Amino acid sequence: MRATKLMAGLIAAGLLACGGSSDSVNGTQFNKSCDVPDTDMKGTAAAGASCSTYKDCAASCCTCTTGQGQWMAAACLGGKCADKTTTCSKTASDSTYCN
């Protein structure tokens, strides 16, 4: 009985995972700026457009709220390209980009 409930839960979780969209985000910087010479963030899709990965979406230049610096980021959330505010908040990392 216990194993049956566990298997049913695992199967349901697997079906939900297969049916849902996965989120894809990435951030990078070069010399604390958005001027990254070699990046895979070359997408052109605007916020709200359909996407499969962050690579489909246009990159945003995000600014540190603490310290100083900027980073380039792109995000595909729930199958749609995220706006700049959401993209920056999803990729923010003071220890990585701002200090």
Image (cartoon, rainbow, N blue to C red):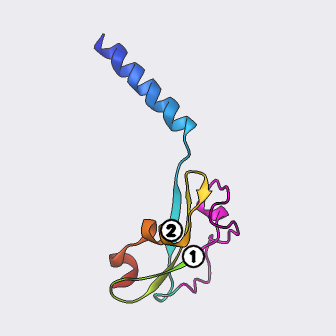
Q: Is residue 38 above or below residue 87?
A: below
Q: Is residue 25 above or below residue 19?
A: below
Q: Is residue 76 above or below residue 96?
A: above
Q: Distance from label 1 to label 2 (Cα)?
A: 7 Å
Q: Residue placed at 67% from the left, 72% from the top?
A: 42
Counting the numbered discs, the total is 2
Location of residue 1 in the rendering, given as x and y in whole percent from the top left corner: 30, 10
Residue underneath mark 2: 87
Q: Quarter of the image containing the C terminus?
A: bottom left
The answer to which of marks 1 and 2 sits earlier in the sequence is: 1
Looking at the rendered structure, the kind of residue marked 2 is: Thr
Q: Which residues are magenta?
A: 34-60
Location of residue 84 in the rendering, given as x and y in whole percent from the top left corner: 54, 72
Residue farthest along the left direction in this orientation: 2
Q: Residue placed at 33% from the left, 77% from the top?
A: 95
Instruction: Specify whether residue 51 is painted magenta.
Output: yes
Quarter of the image where one finds residue 94:
bottom left
Location of residue 63 in the rendering, given as x and y in whole percent from the top left corner: 45, 83
Q: Nearer the viewer, residue 45 or 17?
A: 45
Instruction: Specify whether residue 65 is painted magenta.
Output: no
Residue farthest along the top direction in this orientation: 1
Mark 1 touches mark 2? (CB < 8 Å): yes
- Label 1 sits on a secondary structure element that is strand
Q: Residue placed at 34% from the left, 17% from the top?
A: 5
Residue underneath mark 1: 60
- Label 2 sits on a secondary structure element that is helix
Left or right: residue 47 versus residue 88 is: right
Mark 1, other Cα within 10 Å: few <14 / some 14–19 / many ≥20: many
The prevailing secondary structure element of the residues shown in magenta is loop
Looking at the rendered structure, the kind of residue marked 1 is: Ser
Q: Which mark is residue 51?
A: none
Q: Nearer the viewer, residue 32 or 89?
A: 89
